[in-house]
Amino acid sequence: MRTEDLILVSVDDHIVEPPGLFDGRLPAKYADLAPRLTRKEDGTDVWIYDGNEIPNIGLNAVVGRPPEEYGIEPTSLEDMRPGCYDVNERVRDMNANGVLGSMNFPSFPQFCGQLFARSEDKDMALAMVRAYNDWHIEGWCGAAPGRFIPLAIPVLWDPKLAADEVRRVAAKGCHAVTFSENPEKLGWPSFHSDHWDPFWQACSDEGTIACLHIGSSSQLVITSVEAPIDVLITLQPMNIVQAAADLLWSPVLRKFPDLRIALSEGGIGWIPYLLERVDYVYHHHRAWTGQDFGDILPSQLFKERIITCFIDDAFGVDNRRYLNLDNITWECDYPHSDSTWPQAPELAMKYLAEVDDGEVDKITHLNAMRHFRYDPFGIRPRERCTVGALRAEAGDVDVSVVSRAPAGTVAKKRTGASDLKSLSDDEG
């Protein structure tokens, strides 16, 4: 397959929310309490909500900037490429990158709506969650039909209300919801409890995928306060193995046979060994641990029910025979620092060049379309969905590297793990 003939659907990208997203979407009594974007004296933009101040962390929106300017300091919209927060510019950047479809995780509410879950006024919090989801589905995804996969945030503090929200947004065409990789770290019951059963049941009933993004436990993996940030960045995707093991040994997947879970931004290269290890543990220890998977192995359960994705993972693709090819998906991670924009097709072809065309299609778009009930071809003819066709529509999009702010000079002063402790909740 030629690079220009690829069709790319990314199941993990991110939104930097624009100001005014709550306008007209809240009950009158909560309108003045909505999160608002405010410019500070130092020139950075922060969201203010319920006594909290939430900055946009630099690494969350650095596409198009020189790597020496990357950093973890708070930033402003002016420091970012407009495609980070403007949906029309986002589509133009997708075209320039040859990407047809995109699923976008939230930023300031945190990966699974932790910001709203911390509010003491739960009625207000519920209104915020619903308003955010309505904006995401109607205002963001609805602005460009066929280009986005809707993704809702959950009502994290109440599993029954969470179930209601899953059903409400499913009626609007949204069949993906973010959730925590480890809810116990957020102060709620773990996967091993029946606490979340109403939520899991609603996801099962509606065919909604629960997406567990790395960092959605609001905790960063820090090995030492003296460790350079490179250690954290290296380990971050692979640490999703903790959520995978937790899920496999919990009753969740066995109790809800129609439930599908996505491990978002976790890569796939580590999976073959995990599957080998869980089967070994099952054979050697089930007599005393009491685990019972019936007539299948834990590895089979993983392959059948867990959707995986990767950004750049040549080893994982080369070892795809150990995985379920029908559950492997691709991601771009725009506009985060790991993103392959604007050369995603070229980078993808480095490890897809020797892969059968049918397998390439599954990995790059067909699996995502099936799992997330996403049908771009119903709106846009397939021949207009390829890398070549999309890029032909983006001839005026400037993808050159542009210096936007001297963030790098500041960032170099704070590159240790100890500097990240105060930011871990903002990242999650």
Image (cartoon, rainbow, N blue to C red):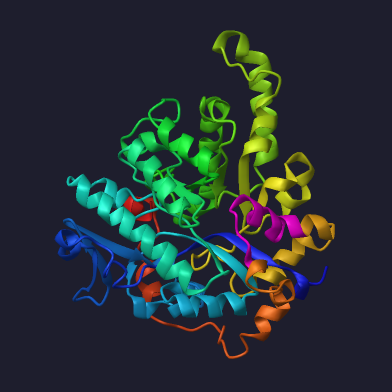
Q: Position of residue 306 (x, y in %)?
A: 61, 40
Query: Residue visible at 49% across and 59% down?
Result: 150
Highlighted range, magenta: 361-376
Query: Residue visible at 36% across and 30% down?
Result: 189
Instruction: State whether residue 209 is above or below residue 337.
Output: above
Which residue reaches farthest bottom? Answer: 396
Picture quadrant of residue 157: top left
Q: Is residue 262 left or right of residue 52?
A: right
Query: Residue visible at 66% across and 15% down?
Result: 284
Q: Is residue 415 visible?
A: yes
Q: Position of residue 191 (x, y in %)?
A: 45, 30
Which residue reaches farthest top? Answer: 288
- Image quadrant holding the N terminus, namely bottom right
Q: Is residue 308 left or right of residue 16?
A: right
Q: Is residue 220 visible?
A: no
Picture quadrant of residue 288: top right
Q: Position of residue 22 (x, y in %)?
A: 28, 66
Instruction: State whether residue 370 is above or below residue 59.
Output: above
Name the residue nearer the viewer: 117 or 242: 117
